[in-house]
Amino acid sequence: MIDLRKASRPRAGHVARLASAGLLTLAAAAGAGAAHADATAPQALPTGCSGASPITCRYPVSPGNYDVTVSVGGAAAGQTEMWVEARRLMLPATRTAAGAVATYSFTVNVRRPEGQPTGQGGDGNPGLDIRFTGSAPQVSAVSVKAAVQPPVVYLAGDSTVCDQPAAPYTGWGQMITTAVRPGAAIANYADSGESSGSFLNNPALFPALLPKVRANDPVLIQLGHNDKQTTASDYRNNLTTMITRVRAKGGVPILVTPPVRRLFEGDRLTSTALHVNGVGVNLPAEMRSVGAAQRVPVIDLTAKSKALVESLGPSTSAQLFLRSSVDGVTDNTHFSQYGAMRIGTLLLQSIREQNLPLAAYLR
């Protein structure tokens, strides 16, 4: 175990409050936080950490799953977010009063490359990277130890899901990590540009994910954005093959229909936005049909995101995606951080509504 903290422990006191109005909707509280007060707490960073804003911590661990406990706060008032590896949000913006220290625990999946499995955007750094950001980030202790066979939720998907290495692009898989309890991990194998066929056959993707799946591990499969010329038969066969192979490992396959694009005709989304592809295949409908035939749960993220985007309208819905005025690029497929958070919230709602296996791991 790596246990890196300040020399003195803070004494018991009041509880620090989470104060992020946006990202906090993913989880009512991002961890069992225990806060302490000590106005004279030393300000030295834990070993392995450096910087002021952000504070960066690096630990030379091998690929695997790790239980990570952090204490944020200190002598001065602070506001801290915690990110790991390739921009996975673990702790939403959290305020601590002067003299307060709040402790949170997470289980983190570490792999190489740390972001997209094919190395798009770079391999990242070996080991575990943790970054503490925010308007006044503070960290007073970090503990890292190997997790003992935690349940792992595997994500199979495209660029709207993946661990995007660089802002402003953000996948919903990077945001749902705040909602997962310590003791369970998210392993995001989604990769930009992948169709159902390329994800199934690329050695870095489904063939790399599958051997790691253990009994009862959920595997969420969201593919469709890049199946622009895939026939209905090929799409159904690709999904069915993944389902069959996950089940053979004892895992729990869960299909996720793709979230919509922001393409409007008047105040309604177009058929392209709803993933009717270039050869006329209604991909979400095909996925729902496969789910029914295979008796696999289906999260209809197409329907939920359609309702959200159309309720916001052509103008306001732009904030969910990338805007030139804010992000330097206009992109009606990929999400802003805010958009990825909102889509992640819809996914989590479905998991709870259907009482899917992942629901037991949510905060």
Image: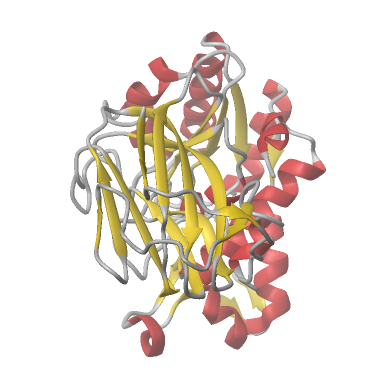
Q: Which residue: 61% across, 71% down?
A: 20
Q: Residue at x 26, y 47 (%)?
A: 47
Which residue is depicted at the point 48% across and 58% down? 72
Snapshot colouring: secondary structure
From this view, report whether residue 210 is shown above or below residue 177: above
Q: Nearer the viewer, residue 271 or 245?
A: 245
Of residue 306 and residue 131, the one placed in the foreground of this image is 131
Residue 109, quarter of the rendered image: top left
Residue at screen point 64% across, 50% down: 34
Q: Is residue 276 above or below residue 63?
A: below
Give 232 or 186, whichever is nearer the viewer: 186
Q: On the rendered structure, is 362 left or right of 104?
A: right
In this rendering, the answer to whether 285 lies above or below 290 is below
Residue 54: percent from left, percent from top:
31, 67
Q: Is residue 86 visible?
A: no
Location of the C terminus by quadrant is top right
Task: Please say whether residue 227 is visible from this viewpoint.
Answer: yes
Residue 192 placed where, x, y %?
Answer: 33, 50
